Amino acid sequence: MGELVTTVTKFKAKKGSENQLIDELRNFDNSSSKSWQVLSLGDNEYAAINTYQSIENRTEDVVSGLDWLDGITPLIDLYENGSRTEAFSGIVLYENE
């Protein structure tokens, strides 16, 4: 088994699209994830947090995630750098279940 990997991806909803974006985040196929959450960050911004058993499991979501992101682009505001999301990931150093 590989090392656990967690990803955090932020989205900024367009005014009036908040509930629709939340529904899309909740309905994304997270079956490759060990666990996942959707957080409200305030100011129409949301984060999807996914933890995977390995980086290989994460890569399974990359292609489907990009196709999914193309479909929700009308619901989101771009960040200042022109990106649809802000994201980072890392290897889990400690987990308490």
Image (cartoon, rainbow, N blue to C red):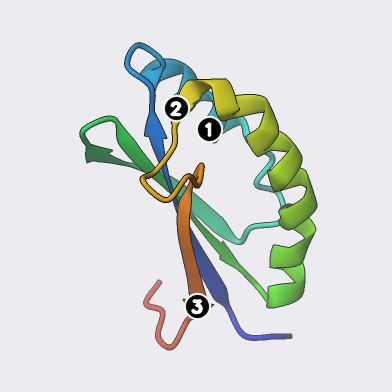
Q: Going 69% across and 46% down the picture, which residue do you hit?
A: 65
Q: Which residue is under mark 2?
A: 22
Q: Residue 81, percent across and down?
A: 42, 51
Structural distance between the alpha carbons of marks 2 and 3: 24 Å
Callout 2: SS: helix
Callout 3: SS: strand
Residue at the farthest front position:
81
Choose between 91 and 82: the one closer to the eye: 82
Q: Residue 89, percent across and down?
A: 50, 71
| Dot placed on the residue nearer the N-terminal end, 3 or 1 | 1
Q: Are marks 1 and 2 in contact (CB under 8 Å)?
A: yes
Where, quadrant-wise, is the N terminus in this rendering? Answer: bottom right
Looking at the rendered structure, the kind of residue marked 1 is: Arg
Q: Residues within 10 Å of mark 2 (few under 14, many from 20)?
A: some
Frontmost of labels 3 and 1 is 3
Q: Residue 51, percent across and down?
A: 54, 64
Q: Going 75% across and 38% down the picture, which residue do you hit?
A: 67
Looking at the rendered structure, the kind of residue marked 2 is: Ile
Q: Which residue is under mark 3?
A: 90
Q: Residues within 10 Å of mark 3 (few under 14, many from 20)?
A: few
Structural distance between the alpha carbons of marks 3 and 1: 22 Å
Q: Is residue 68 left or right of residue 81?
A: right
24 over 19 or under it: above or below: below
Q: Which residue is under mark 1?
A: 26
Looking at the rendered structure, the kind of residue marked 3 is: Gly
33 over 38 or under it: above or below: below
Q: Quadrant of residue 16?
A: top left
